[in-house]
Image: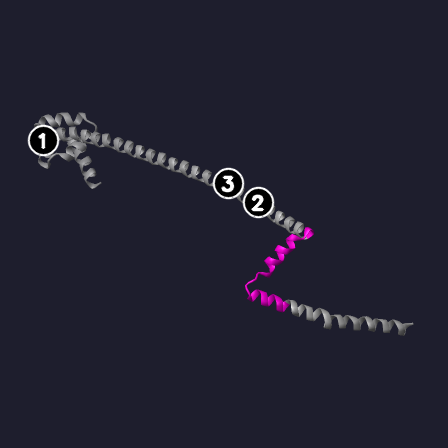
Amino acid sequence: MEQFEKEEEKKKASKLQWFLFVVFIPLLFTISVVLLILTFSGINVFEQGKKYAGQLPFVSQWIEGTDANEKKKLQEQIVELKATIVEKEKELAKTKDTIKEKNAEIDTLKQEIARLQAEKEQAQQPTAQTKEQTNAPRVDVVKMYETMSPKKAAEIIPQMSDREAVDLLSQLKTDKVAAILEKMDAANAAKYTSLLAKKANN
């Protein structure tokens, strides 16, 4: 029994080998040669095959179904791409609006800085004028005491505060100060001489 089965298997194997070497391989070789010849002749074998296959009922339906599915997929991809483009355009518009707002804020800040700078300059100008006005009377007072008699000056200066008196005497000429101190009593003369010496040392 086992020997019979082995013989059957050998027969099947020999038949398969015969089919491969005698039928299948020569047929495959022939088809390859024909395809090469047709291709070199300028005939698109695949397009022709599709054309003739389309004439067959079942094959044509399968091809049409495949084309319809591909078209549907392409349409869906196009719709998705359009939606993406619309979304990106919206984001770009928002970004542009944000940039405009930031630029407007920057312009506002620049205007505010310019306004504050102008206010600062205006505030500084009166200060300078005030200093000039403050210094002007002092210069007039000094000139006035320069022309005043030493005796009269010696009577007025002790009525001032020590600081005012020393500031005034320090701006007078030396000979004028000496003449005024001569007309003062000894106590005031000594006091103002000491204060002038301290001011000179500082």
Instruction: Please tell me which residue is depicted at 60% across the width and 45% down the height of the picture.
Output: 72
Q: Is residue 166 above or below residue 38?
A: above
Q: Which mark is residue 195?
A: none
Amino acid under label 2?
A: Gln
User: Residue 126 in magenta?
Assistant: no
Q: CA distance from mark 1 to mark 2?
A: 106 Å
Q: The residue tagged with tag 1: helix, strand or loop?
A: helix
Which quadrant of the view contains residue 52?
bottom right
Residue sitting nearer the eye, 8 or 57: 57
Which quadrant of the view contains residue 48?
bottom right
Q: Which residue is mark 3?
A: 86
Q: In this image, 112 relative to 35: left or right?
A: left
Q: Which residue is mark 2?
A: 75
Q: Which residue is mark 1?
A: 146
x and y percentages locating residue 13 in the rendered image: 80, 72
Earlier along the polypeptide chain: callout 1 or callout 3?
Answer: 3
Is residue 162 at least partly visible in the picture? no
Instruction: Please tell me which residue is depicted at 59% across the width and 67% down the height of the picture.
Output: 37
Instruction: Please tell me which residue is depicted at 48% across the width and 41% down the height of the picture.
Output: 89
Mark toward the viewer: 1 or 3: 3
Magenta span covers which residues? Answer: 32-58
Earlier along the polypeptide chain: callout 1 or callout 2?
Answer: 2
x and y percentages locating residue 69 in the rendered image: 63, 47
Q: CA distance from mark 1 to mark 3?
A: 90 Å
Proximity of marks 1 and 3: CB atoms separated by less than 8 Å:
no
x and y percentages locating residue 160 in the rendered image: 19, 26
Q: Is residue 65 above or below residue 160?
A: below
Q: Mark 3 packing: few (<14 Cα in 10 Å), some, or many (20+)?
A: few
| Quadrant of the frame with the C terminus | top left
x and y percentages locating residue 96 in the rendered image: 43, 39
Earlier along the polypeptide chain: callout 2 or callout 3?
Answer: 2
